[in-house]
Image: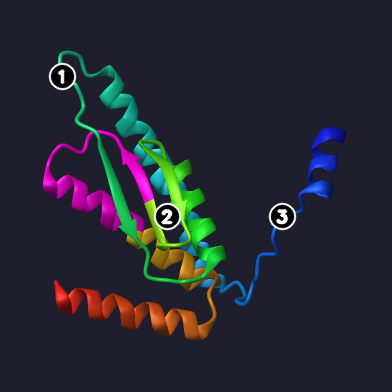
């Protein structure tokens, strides 16, 4: 503990700017959905572990995030990483993307579903803790991306 305190004194962390404030109902939905995802994914990973004779097809996906808020990037990355069956490899502030390893995603459709789960998580985080401007910008970016698909 003393060593970690000395390290923080010598190499202080960069300040993290918090512009938004928690929004009660979206925050409640974020927490509830996160707990559901943890339980459901735990069951899914246990089923994969108990499945004999087949090897799961894993994937590494890059998910470009739609927001440019460091705190949202951090919270989204942590929540994605804490759900069983997904492992955060890299959270990049330079490209505003997450690189995630996901288990048992052998088809293109399954990979896209995993990518959509990360985007859904990002949306819930923005709605729960973002500023009104960030929420509006996020929704505009989402609509633009959907229109371009």
Check whether the beta carbons of the residues at disc 1 and disc 2 lie within 8 A of each other.
no
Locate residue 37 relative to residue 129 in the image: left or right. Answer: left
Q: Residues within 10 Å of mark 2 (few under 14, many from 20)?
A: some
Determine whether 38 is above or below 135 in the image. Answer: above
Q: Nearer the viewer, residue 15 or 43?
A: 15
Q: Is residue 1 visible?
A: no
| Nearer the camera: disc 3 or disc 1 | 3
Residue drawn at point x = 71 percent, y = 55 percent:
13
Magenta range = 99-118
How many neighbours does mark 3 have within 10 angstroms: few (below 14), some (14-19), or many (20 or more)?
few
22 inside magenta stretch: no
**Residue matched to label 1:** 54
Q: Is residue 103 magenta?
A: yes
Disc 2/disc 3 C-alpha distance (Å) = 30 Å
Q: Identify the disc placed on residue 13.
A: 3
- Report the residue at 39% width, 77% height from top: 138
Q: Which mark is residue 33?
A: 2
């Amino acid at each position: 503990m003393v060593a970690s305190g000395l390290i923080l004194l010598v190499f202080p962390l960069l300040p993290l700017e918090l512009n938004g404030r928690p929004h009660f109902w979206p925050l409640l939905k974020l927490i509830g959905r996160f707990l559901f995802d943890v339980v459901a994914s735990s069951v899914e990973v246990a089923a994969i572990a108990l499945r004999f004779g087949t090897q799961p097809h894993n994937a590494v996906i890059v998910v470009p995030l739609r927001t440019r808020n460091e705190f949202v990037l951090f919270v989204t990355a942590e929540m994605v990483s804490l759900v069983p069956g997904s492992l955060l490899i890299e959270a990049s502030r330079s490209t505003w993307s997450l690189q995630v390893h996901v288990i048992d995603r052998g088809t293109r459709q399954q990979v896209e579903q995993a990518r959509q789960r990360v985007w859904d998580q990002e949306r819930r985080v923005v709605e729960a803790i973002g500023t009104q401007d960030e929420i509006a910008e996020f929704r505009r970016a989402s609509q633009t991306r959907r229109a371009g698909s």
